């Protein structure tokens, strides 16, 4: 039996009635505070990035943004919680490569990055530097590689966490140089760096912002920077490519993510606010001081970056034999 004109009219009214609140909610976004989940302790590089830009983003969105550190499980706890959060634009996740690589490291991570998340912005790069203690008497990457090959397994590497951006950078270098160092695990970069300064560790890769003060005071020796070009603070330190290991070039990046089911108008609004913040001179200055260069990016560029990096990182993990604990 066909639908009568009256019945069709009632259905149309009902559809309009139920869809109107959702449409209004999207057009009024945001109408309450936004929470950003950071998977690592306060004071780390991810936390610094989050707090550097959120004040400006909040001004644009006319809402307060609360940064919540939720460490544990190598980031899995926070990332799984973000993946399960309501897809309404009020819960964001900010993190580095772990969101892309952890499902490869951990079979029960609880999410798939390309299926469960949309990257909405904040492509900032974590530039890092390879350092050794002065007591090692090594001045170049080539000398380090030669020493590691002469003493296989005798040199140690201070690893701030399996699957972290620093760990992935190091593993890519070890593969390119065909060397093996004894892996010593730490809970973050600061304690690992302290042990390097006291010559308990032989080699580390450290975020520039953390390493520069110690390079300047001579307590660590820089060998190469993991950047596309030399950094102005260390003009005499070559890039890893200039040092002869172009295949080891890898600069981890950090992004802001929301659940993939978040409505497109909300995703667009968040992306606009983030890009506006990254173009703000005050934000650019703060990121520059912390040696964390940022770049506004369109949603399509971010999606491409996510996919290509996930494939690269999965290959690093497979070649290195890394597994989650």
Image (cartoon, rainbow, N blue to C red):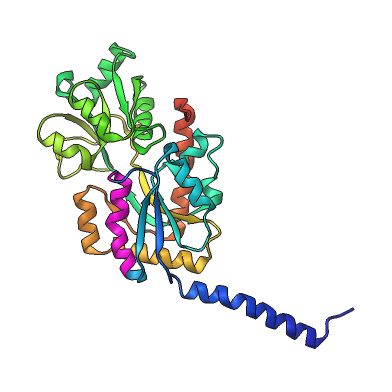
Give whichever of 43, 57 is nearer the camera. Answer: 43
Q: How many numbered tags mark residues here?
A: 0
Is residue 94 visible from the viewing direction of this image? Answer: yes
The outermost residue toward the right is 1
Overall secondary structure of the magenta stretch? helix
Q: For the point 50% across and 49% down, which residue is it?
A: 81
Q: Toward which corner of the image does residue 233 lie, by quadrant?
A: top left
The answer to whether residue 32 is above or below residue 261 is: below
Q: For the point 51% across and 63% down, which residue is it? A: 88
Q: Decide if residue 79 is on the left or right side of residue 212.
A: right
Instruction: Report x, y in % for residue 191.
Output: 26, 31
Magenta span of residues: 43-59
Q: Is residue 236 visible?
A: no
Q: In terms of image quadrants, where is residue 230?
A: top left
Q: Quadrant of the N terminus?
A: bottom right
Residue 46 part of the magenta-drawn span: yes
Q: List the single residue furthest toward the left.
A: 217
Residue 129 counted in the magenta span: no
The residue shown at (40%, 65%) is: 33
Q: Position of residue 182 (x, y in %)?
A: 34, 19
Dividing the picture into quadrants, the one containing residue 71 is: top left
- Residue 26 x %, y %: 50, 72
Residue 95 rendering spot, x and y as whole percentages: 39, 47
Eyeballing the image, is 217 above or below 149?
below
């Amino acid at each position: 039996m066909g639908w009568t004109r009256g019945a069709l009219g009632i259905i149309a009214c009902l559809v309009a009635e139920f869809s109107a609140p959702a449409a209004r909610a999207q057009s009024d976004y945001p109408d309450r505070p936004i929470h950003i989940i950071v998977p690592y302790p306060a004071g780390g590089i991810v936390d610094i990035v989050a707090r550097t830009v959120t004040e400006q983003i909040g001004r644009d969105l006319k809402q307060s943004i609360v940064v919540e550190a939720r460490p544990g499980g190598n980031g899995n706890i926070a990332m799984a919680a973000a993946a399960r959060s309501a897809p309404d634009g009020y819960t964001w996740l900010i993190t580095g490569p772990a969101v892309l690589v952890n499902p490869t490291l951990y079979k029960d991570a609880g999410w798939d990055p390309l299926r469960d998340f949309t990257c909405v912005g904040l492509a900032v790069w974590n530039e890092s530097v390879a350092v050794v203690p002065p007591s090692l008497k090594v001045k170049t990457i080539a000398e380090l590689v030669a020493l590691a090959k002469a003493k296989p397994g005798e040199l140690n590497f201070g690893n701030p966490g399996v699957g972290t951006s620093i760990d992935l950078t190091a593993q890519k270098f070890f593969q390119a140089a065909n060397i093996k160092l004894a892996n010593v695990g730490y809970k973050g970069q600061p304690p690992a760096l302290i042990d390097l300064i006291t010559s308990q560790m032989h080699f580390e890769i450290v975020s520039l912002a953390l390493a520069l003060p110690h390079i300047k005071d001579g307590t660590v020796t820089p060998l190469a920077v993991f950047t596309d070009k030399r950094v102005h603070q260390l003009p005499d330190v070559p890039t890893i490519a200039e040092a002869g290991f172009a295949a080891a070039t890898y600069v981890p990046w950090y992004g802001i993510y929301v659940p993939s089911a978040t409505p497109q108008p909300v995703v667009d609004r968040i992306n606009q606010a983030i890009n506006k913040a990254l173009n703000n001179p005050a934000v650019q200055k703060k990121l520059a001081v912390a040696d964390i260069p940022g770049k506004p990016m369109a949603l399509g560029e971010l999606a491409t970056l996510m996919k290509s990096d996930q494939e690269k990182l999965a290959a690093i993990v497979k070649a290195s034999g890394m597994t989650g604990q």
